[in-house]
Image (spheres, helix red, strand yellow):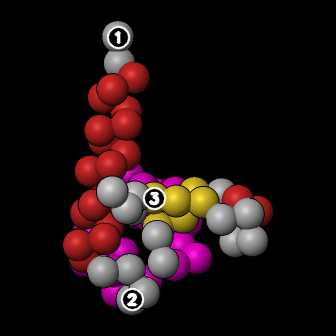
């Protein structure tokens, strides 16, 4: 399974990024938390496909839910 969220020590100091890009996953979350739509995020970051952004959100959701008591 290829993860949609990854990290590379050579990109952003090893922070979490969206696979195949240098876009920090946190930027996607910040857009959505700020009330922007996924389409607005994708317009600003064309290197991220809709499918990949949705996969990253789903991956984060699964990770978070698995940590809940």
Task: Please tell me whether residue 37 is drawn above or below residue 32 in the rendered image.
Answer: below
- Disc 1 residue crowd, few under 14, some 14–19, many 20+, Cα 10 Å: few
Which residue is drawn at the image coordinates 73% and 63% (left, top)?
9
Q: 3 left or right of 17?
A: left
| Label of residue 18 in the image | none
Extent of the magenta region:
21-45
Which residue is drawn at the image coordinates 70% and 59% (left, top)?
14
Q: Is residue 28 magenta?
A: yes
Q: Earlier in the sequence, mark 2 or mark 3?
A: 3
Q: Is residue 44 visible?
A: no
How far apart marks 2 and 3 lie (CA) works out to 17 Å
| Percent position of residue 41, x then y | 36, 75
Q: Secondary structure at mark 1?
A: loop
Q: Earlier in the sequence, mark 2 or mark 1?
A: 2
Q: Earlier in the sequence, mark 3 or mark 1?
A: 3
* Residue that label 3 marks: 5
Q: Is residue 43 magenta?
A: yes
Near-viewer residue (27 or 47): 47
* Residue that label 1 marks: 69
* Residue that label 2 marks: 46
Q: For residue 68, which quarter of the picture? A: top left
Magenta region, mostly helix, strand or loop? helix
| Percent position of residue 13, x then y | 76, 62
């Amino acid at each position: 399974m290829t993860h949609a969220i990854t990290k590379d020590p050579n990109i952003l100091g090893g922070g979490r990024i969206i696979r195949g890009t240098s876009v920090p996953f946190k930027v996607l979350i910040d857009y959505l938390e700020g009330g922007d739509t996924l389409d607005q995020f994708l317009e600003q970051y064309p290197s991220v496909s809709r499918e990949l952004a949705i996969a990253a959100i789903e991956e984060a959701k699964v990770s978070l839910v698995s940590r809940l008591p």
